[in-house]
Image (tube, grey):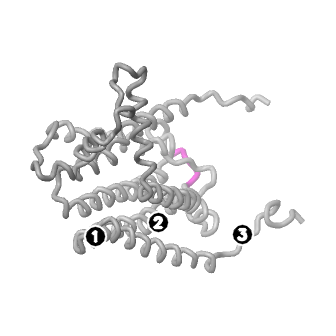
Amino acid sequence: AGCEKEPSSYMWIYILLGNMLRGIGETPITPLGISYLDDFAEEEDVPVYVACLHTIAMLGPMFGFLLGSLCAKLYVDIGFVDLGSITITPQDSRWVGAWWLGFLIGGVTSFLAAIPFCFLPKSLKKPEEANDKTSYGLLENMRKKLTPAQSKPRNQLYYPFLSDFYTSLKNVLSNRMYFTFLCCSLLQFNSFIGFFTYKSKYMEQQYGQSTSKSNFLIGLTTLPPVGIGIFLGGFIMKKYKMGITGATKFAFIMSFLAYVTTLLHFFVGCENHVVAGMTVSYE
């Protein structure tokens, strides 16, 4: 009875706040970074630059898995206890790796990587003939096309920001091409999330691998091909100078081939382990 007590650790609050701050800092990189490239790069070079951006974004999780593999080999209380007194190994089910160490390393790395952004110019000069093709030019053209009823003065609105946001959101979601792409992205991410979430657990249970080994194998075998595919896709778009229609056909063909290949997973598998009380009875 003396060992029974309610958990009193509030560490989850710090992790929650840390992830919120990380999300706030990282969110602008993708939408604003792509707009930045689209506005100030040559039109034929944009696909390659965007592909490089997404490729590097895929390499990050790969190094994260490898770092997680390294941290999982270290005991959770490293630096606070005598490691010579630890009698269990990472293969033991009671082993807890130094999960917190990755947050410190990732935080310091993110801080150092953010410093060069402070030295970027506030704005770059763009040739006048290309202004209409930039996101800023498209926004200005959209505002000019609004009817007087839609373009009310700001002083007549209680919440001008919300009104502008609602108008922009309505215009974006009414674009059939973008809305279709959004639905496809939702379906793809829904499938990938389950894949990445349970793949490591499957490898641990089915193949008897440690948490460290599972993270290492996932990071080494899964993410690099995805990054290479993103880069090759951008390179192909640049080489053949694909427009919206060509890029859509290309994306459909690649997605269909990926879907057909993924169906092969249904023909590959292993029998479940015999676990008393779960897959077989205790008798």
Marks 1 and 2 sit apart, C-alpha to C-alpha, by 36 Å
Asked if residue 86 is among those painted magenta in the image, a careful observer would answer yes
Marks 2 and 3 sit apart, C-alpha to C-alpha, by 21 Å
Q: Residue at x 37, y 73 (%)?
A: 250
Q: What is the crowding at mark 2: few (fewer than 14 residues within 10 Å), some, or many (at least 20)?
A: some
To which residue does mark 1 refer?
242
Can residue 237 be spotted in the picture?
Answer: yes
Furthest-front residue in view? 148
Q: What is the crowding at mark 3: few (fewer than 14 residues within 10 Å), some, or many (at least 20)?
A: few
The foreground one among 242 and 158 is: 158
Q: Earlier in the sequence, mark 1 or mark 3?
A: 1
Estimate the x, y position of residue 265 in percent, counting from the top left.
Answer: 58, 75
Up/down of 206 relative to 147, above or below: below
Q: Is residue 48 left or right of residue 11?
A: left
- In magenta, the rendered stretch is 84-89
SS state under label 1: loop
Furthest-right residue in view? 283
Question: In the rendering, which numbered label is found on residue 179?
Answer: none
Q: Quick check: marks 1 and 2 in contact, CB under 8 Å?
A: no
Marks 1 and 3 sit apart, C-alpha to C-alpha, by 50 Å
Give the amino acid type for the residue marked by disc 3 in the picture. Answer: His
Magenta: main secondary structure: loop
To which residue does mark 3 refer?
273
Estimate the x, y position of residue 242 in percent, counting from the top left.
Answer: 28, 70
To which residue does mark 2 refer?
217
Can residue 109 be spotted in the picture?
Answer: no
Q: Please identify the quadrant where the N terminus is shown.
A: top right
Q: What is the crowding at mark 1: few (fewer than 14 residues within 10 Å), some, or many (at least 20)?
A: some
Q: Earlier in the sequence, mark 2 or mark 3?
A: 2
Give the amino acid type for the residue marked by disc 2 in the picture. Answer: Leu
